[in-house]
Amino acid sequence: MKLTAEQLEHFHKEGYIFIPEAFTAEEIEVLREAAKDVFEPEREEIWREKSGVPRTAFACHTYNKACEILGKHPRLVEPVAQAFEEPVYMHQFKINAKAAFAGDVWQWHQDFVTWHNDDGMPEPRAMNIAVFLDDVLPINGPLMLVPRSHESGAIDAGHDTETTAYPLWTLDNDTVARLVEQGGIVAPTGKAGGLLMFHGNLVHGSAGNITPYPRKIVYLTLSAVSNAITKPTRAEYIAHTDFTPIEALPDDALVQYARSRSQEPAAATA
Amino acid sequence: MKLTAEQLEHFHKEGYIFIPEAFTAEEIEVLREAAKDVFEPEREEIWREKSGVPRTAFACHTYNKACEILGKHPRLVEPVAQAFEEPVYMHQFKINAKAAFAGDVWQWHQDFVTWHNDDGMPEPRAMNIAVFLDDVLPINGPLMLVPRSHESGAIDAGHDTETTAYPLWTLDNDTVARLVEQGGIVAPTGKAGGLLMFHGNLVHGSAGNITPYPRKIVYLTLSAVSNAITKPTRAEYIAHTDFTPIEALPDDALVQYARSRSQEPAAATA
């Protein structure tokens, strides 16, 4: 999937692009089942909130078939390659759970600062592209973005190892207030299947979730192949060191997989 | 101010009524200045989040003139007296700050359970009526209500003394999930000046606020005079024991006060 010239212009100007219902209900269903399987067992790649509920499942594309397919999906890989004008590799793959009743905060931050400080990523030529696995509502901790904040480049950050179970380079309140004064806050919401791509320097965060509605989102962090990380300090399952360019699968790859699992005759799905 | 028959029916059926922009910008301005004065000093009636920012200012109607006027305002006193069909006294008066960046959660709860358990209130013939002092947005921790949950009566609750700095009788997740399944969640949002009245048994809560936008709300807890508390265990500034029926002031009382403060000639404000 290629972005239109208009979408690409919006992305460069605002720092993000949101495409509602980019994935169909059938595609989302197979991904939701995958997420259920992924979060079931105890594994070192699954990090938990202080309360014990799952926060993040890293690298499940390495052991779950539907996630593997999503990691090569053209609707995710192609827009990012298009924005960077070169092929991309997988820097990180994760599902953030934002569990019902207990999903915790992600403080305001820029992703690239963490990739740079912790992984030795040279340039902000990587970014997150995310798929909503649940309906994202105003009340279940939607991702909040500060439009145009990517224009500020990488901003000095403090290493927050206290607020949540996930260490993060976060911004101070005065900086966030100043950027919000300029750009406001947007919180894209919508049905499961929505697609959100945002610049590595775009300031974002999310509040906790006390509702009974979980809010799972899959994040692919895709990096330009020219932008390999140089000094990873985090586990391989958090910051991958396989810089092979991703070859995108056909657009119907997830649908084909879903139908093959439901054991319909191959002819009916062709 | 009296509720219309339609509004009263909505209240009895859904457990709440929301009236946008019930107070004017001029009235809200004087209340916002009052809130600023109130939260300034250190006082025992001002409770703080674990982070130190203000959470709640109790009983400021006893020492701040604008708050005193609001505590007798006909747009607050009359609708509650109308719903109970008798005069009301002030059980509690507070401003909840939900401060920018650091406003913490209020877990799901029913107010009457706390009033009953901690103050010895006989019946759910008391309720909160609230005025928005800031714009309430989907993203700055709006109050979330579970419509029709008041029909369940008082539900068994656990005493949560851990989550926040304010001890509260809170509901378990299964109960909340079941009630939300039936009634959904509404989160009234809108400009400063909005008015929200909700039944003492209506289940409600609010998420934290990580945005730069504070979300202050004044809450009057008004009780039917026949429903005096019988065994207060909390401080007088939290659970008042003066059961005098409130006599409502004229509808323009706040405006008159605002204008008298700005030292305009009395004749111009008559």
Image (cartoon, coloured by chain):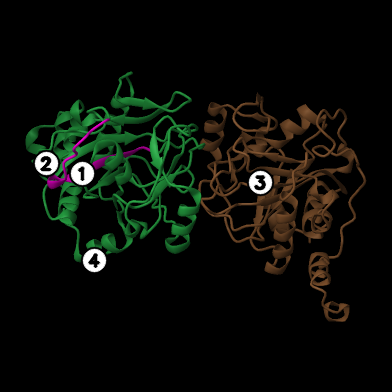
Chain colours: A green, B brown
Give the residue type at disc 3: Lys
Can the viewer see residue A142 in this picture? no
The foreground one among A210 and B200 is A210
* Mark 4 or mark 1, earlier in chain: 4
Give the x, y percent position of residue A62.
18, 28
Cβ atoms at labels 3 and 2 below 8 Å apart: no
User: Could you say which quadrant of the image residue A64 lies in?
Assistant: top left
Q: Which residue has dot 4 on it?
A: A6
- What's the magenta region? A216-233
Please indicate whether residue A72 sits to the left or right of residue B89 in the image: left
| Callout 1 crowding tier (Cα within 10 Å): few <14, some 14–19, many ≥20 | many
Can the viewer see residue A59 in this picture? yes
Q: Is there one chain holding both mark 4 and mark 3?
A: no
Please indicate whether residue B227 sits to the left or right of residue A213 in the image: right
Cβ atoms at labels 2 and 1 below 8 Å apart: yes
Q: Which residue has dot 3 on it?
A: B13
| Callout 4 crowding tier (Cα within 10 Å): few <14, some 14–19, many ≥20 | few
Please indicate whether residue A117 sits to the left or right of residue A102 in the image: left
- Residue A226 among those drawn in magenta: yes
Q: Which residue has dot 2 on it?
A: A246
| Callout 2 crowding tier (Cα within 10 Å): few <14, some 14–19, many ≥20 | some
Please indicate whether residue B71 sits to the left or right of residue A21 in the image: right
Give the residue type at disc 1: Leu
Which residue: 42% across, 45% down?
A: A205
Q: Which residue has dot 1 on it?
A: A222
